[in-house]
Image (cartoon, rainbow, N blue to C red):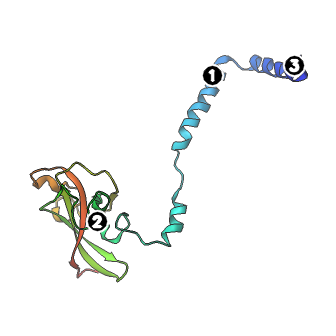
């Protein structure tokens, strides 16, 4: 028997005398569970995003785009439509909610009409939820948590458009 084998045997026998099988299994279990939980722990990934955000202006497919300051829903620009028109197969809701958003390019406030596009199953892409200046649910026209497709023949919600209605007096 080599010296390495002899030393290993001594260490293993000593460990077996000090620790039982149950404690060894408990330690192995902790390592396995800890290894599985470790990737789920929160950590800040935004540093890289902040570096690029200074260089680039948000597009109409990003929740930070200025027109989306009061939007709650999926962006139609990510679902086959445009910023102000529904994708094929979906129709614009007859009822809407409104918001006032400031355009950073000209520092003017604009009245934005948020219309849900209805008639297709939910898009599921580019979910945004901003509640800037949102009012309680009893003020229906300024509340963004309602399925506005409920007034349509097909009450299924697909996505939301953000059309500029005009310049706002509020600023």
Q: Nearer the viewer, residue 55 or 103?
A: 55
Which of discs 1 and 3 lies nearer the camera? The answer is: 3
**Is the residue marked by circle 2 packed among few (<14), some (14-19), or many (20+) residues within 10 Å?**
many
Report the Cα–Cα distance between label 3 and label 2. 72 Å
Give the number of the disc on residue 104: none
Q: Quadrant of residue 76?
A: bottom left
Query: Can you identify the residue that label 2 sits on?
Result: 70
Give the number of the disc on residue 25: 1
Tags 1 and 3 touching, CB below 8 Å: no
Q: Which element is circle 2 on?
A: loop
Q: Which element is circle 3 on?
A: helix
**Is the residue marked by circle 3 packed among few (<14), some (14-19), or many (20+) residues within 10 Å?**
few
Q: Residue at x 18, y 49 (%)?
A: 156
Report the Cα–Cα distance between label 2 and label 1. 53 Å
Q: Nearer the viewer, residue 164 or 40?
A: 164
Left or right, 34 with respect to 21, comes to left
Report the Cα–Cα distance between label 1 and label 3. 25 Å
Tags 3 and 2 touching, CB below 8 Å: no
Query: Can you identify the residue that label 3 sits on?
Result: 6
Badge 1 or badge 3: first in the primary sequence: 3
Which of discs 3 and 2 lies nearer the camera? The answer is: 3
**Is the residue marked by circle 1 packed among few (<14), some (14-19), or many (20+) residues within 10 Å?**
few
Badge 2 or badge 1: first in the primary sequence: 1
């Amino acid at each position: 028997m080599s010296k390495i084998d002899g030393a290993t045997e001594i260490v293993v026998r000593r460990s077996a005398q000090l620790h039982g099988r149950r404690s060894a299994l408990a330690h192995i279990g902790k390592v396995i569970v800890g290894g599985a939980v470790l990737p789920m722990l929160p950590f800040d990934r935004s540093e890289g995003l902040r570096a690029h955000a200074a260089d680039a202006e948000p597009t109409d497919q990003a929740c930070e785009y200025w027109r989306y300051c009061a939007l709650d829903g999926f962006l139609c620009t990510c679902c086959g439509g445009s910023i102000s028109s529904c994708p094929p197969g979906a129709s614009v809701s007859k009822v809407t909610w409104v918001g006032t958003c400031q355009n950073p390019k000209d520092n003017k406030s604009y009245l934005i009409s948020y219309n849900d596009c209805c008639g297709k199953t939910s898009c599921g892409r580019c979910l945004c939820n901003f509640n800037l200046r949102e009012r309680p649910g009893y003020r229906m026209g300024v509340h963004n948590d309602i399925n506005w497709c409920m007034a349509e023949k097909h009450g299924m919600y697909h996505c939301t458009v953000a059309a500029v209605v005009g310049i706002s007096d509020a600023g």
